[in-house]
Structure formats: structure tokens, C-alpha cells
Image (spheres, grey):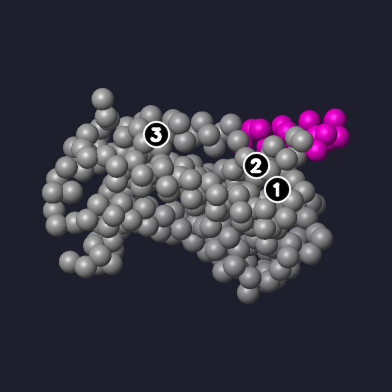
Amino acid sequence: MNTFKSIIVVGQYEWKRALARKKVALLIIFTILIELLPFVVLNLLPIPSMLLGITGLMWFVGAITPHFFFLQFVALLIGSGSTAEEYDQGTADLILSKPLSRVSYLLGKFFGGLTLVSFVAFLTTFLAIVLSTATFGAQLYLEYAPVVYLSLVFSTMVFFSIGFAAGEAFRSPSLAYLVASFIFITSFILVPFLAAVNSLTGDALYLDISQALPTWSVQNLPMMIAQELFLGSGTLPFLFSFGPEIAGTMLEAVTGILIYSSIGIAIAFIRFLKTDVTKKSIE
């Protein structure tokens, strides 16, 4: 079996294994429900006044809202359990005893998990377009929906990579998810907190620190791209109750995503390739 085919086979196995985990399946279902419920409510009640001026952009609002929080937890859960559960259940020894290179195995696990997260992002984006059209009528700028979707996937790679690295580093799914979730929640809380401190003190150092945190890039890149393509100087202020936008550039956001994702991938591969045993932990 050649390397490419091996990666595909392991990737397919990763989809089946991840979806078989009740926690993953329930979190994916919950994320989709989070997408559905607001539109159901809006169909039953009068449209709030703050939405009247942006009804043609509700597809974008619907696509980006789960991304701020729930989609990141899907990525963390899938990534942290990808290799860790194989060690925990003792199946890593069996799989690696097959005629399969270690690089092909880990690449298959990584891309299998990442494509599953990408599929969840596709579902929420697709539902946002369908539901917003059904609820609010014709939507504007739908030609940019694929670019917005790709920005969501690219951004989500940060916390998927962090979860993947934690899973390989600790080789315990519960501990890996706890550590990766701690990183996300801490960053999620600190970004708006540092922004508030900056507004009170005027000290730009707080903004610099906030921009160095992973959630700054993850939350801001899709909005920056939307502003560049079709929003212009317009904003959707109510979105940022999930995390306020902070002054910065698209290049800085892309750089932050690449740095954090690369660090996570490097940790996972170095740990895996330098370890000679497939035990849950190394004494």
C-alpha cells in the first residue's frame, strides 16, 4: 500500500472512530442545534430591530456564530482523542504492527480528524445559508460563502492542532482534553479582558498581549476577511459579545494561526516519532 493510500485509509478509519465516540457525536449534534434554534425562534417571533438592517447578511451571522465557541470545542474533542484513545484502549500497538509507516499513520489521523471538523463547519455554514434564506429572504454576497467557509476551517485548525498535540503528548484522552480546553477557555476569557483593560488604561501592551493569544486570530480572521470582501467598514457589533474584535491586520491573524498550528503539529510529530513504544505514557 503506497503512502497516499495509507493516509486515506487511516483518515477514513479516523472518521468512523471519532463518530463512534458518544461525546463527539453529541457535541456535533449540539453544535448543529445551536445553528438551528435561533432561526426556529426567529420564525416564531417578530424579527428584533437590531437585525432589520442586516437581514441580507444573516447567512454570515449564522455561519460565524458557532465558530466563536462551539466549533472550537468540537475541534478540541476530536483532536485530543485522535491518538490518545488508541493508546488508552491499546489499539495503537495493533495498528502499528501492520505494514503501515508511522508517518502515514499520524498524517492519516491528523487529516482524518481535521476533515471531520471541516465537515461539521460545512454543515453549519450550509444550514446558515439555507435557514437564513428561508427566514429572511434572498441573501447578499453568497458568492463569498466558500471563502468565509475556508477561513473558518483554517482558523479552527489552531485548536484542533492544540488538541492533537495534547493527545499525543499526554496519551490520555481525558487529560489531553482538559489541558487543551484550559488553553482555549483561558485565551477566550483573556482576550476581551485585556481589551477592556486597554480601553481603561490606554496601554497598548495589553492589546499586544491579547493579539498574541490563539483565540484572537481564530475569532478575528473570518470577520477581517468578510470586511475586506463585502462588509467594508461595516460591523456586526452584537457578534462580539462572544469576543470583541481588536485592532490588527489580516496578516497578523494568519501568522498567528500558522504559528500555533505549526507548534501543535510539531509537538505531536516529534513526540510520536521519537517515542519507541506505544504505551499510554512513558515512565
The first of marks 2 and 1 along the sequence is: 2
Find the magenta span and give its range. Answer: 188-204
Residue 57 image position (x, y, % from top left):
70, 63
The first of marks 2 and 3 along the sequence is: 3
- Do tag 2 and tag 3 residues touch (Cβ < 8 Å)? no
Q: Which residue is mark 1?
A: 239
12 sits to left or right of 212: left
The first of marks 1 and 3 along the sequence is: 3
Q: Nearer the viewer, residue 163 or 99?
A: 99
Q: Is residue 42 visible?
A: no
Residue 29 image position (x, y, % from top left):
43, 48
Query: Residue drawn 61% across and 54% down?
Result: 255
Query: Residue drawn 65% across and 60% down?
Result: 60
For residue 84, which quarter of the picture? top left
Is disc 2 placed on a helix, strand or loop?
loop
Q: Nearer the viewer, residue 65 or 148?
A: 148
Q: Nearer the viewer, residue 232 or 157?
A: 157
For residue 11, which quarter of the picture? bottom left
Q: Is residue 47 above or below residue 137?
A: above
Residue type beneath disc 2: Ala
Residue type beneath disc 1: Leu
Q: Would residue 195 be counted in the magenta stretch?
A: yes
105 sits to left or right of 140: left
Is disc 3 placed on a helix, strand or loop?
helix
206 sits to left or right of 40: right
Q: Which residue is mark 2?
A: 212
- Quarter of the image for the C terminus: give it: top left
| Nearer mark to the viewer, of 2 and 1 | 2
Q: Which residue is mark 3?
A: 176
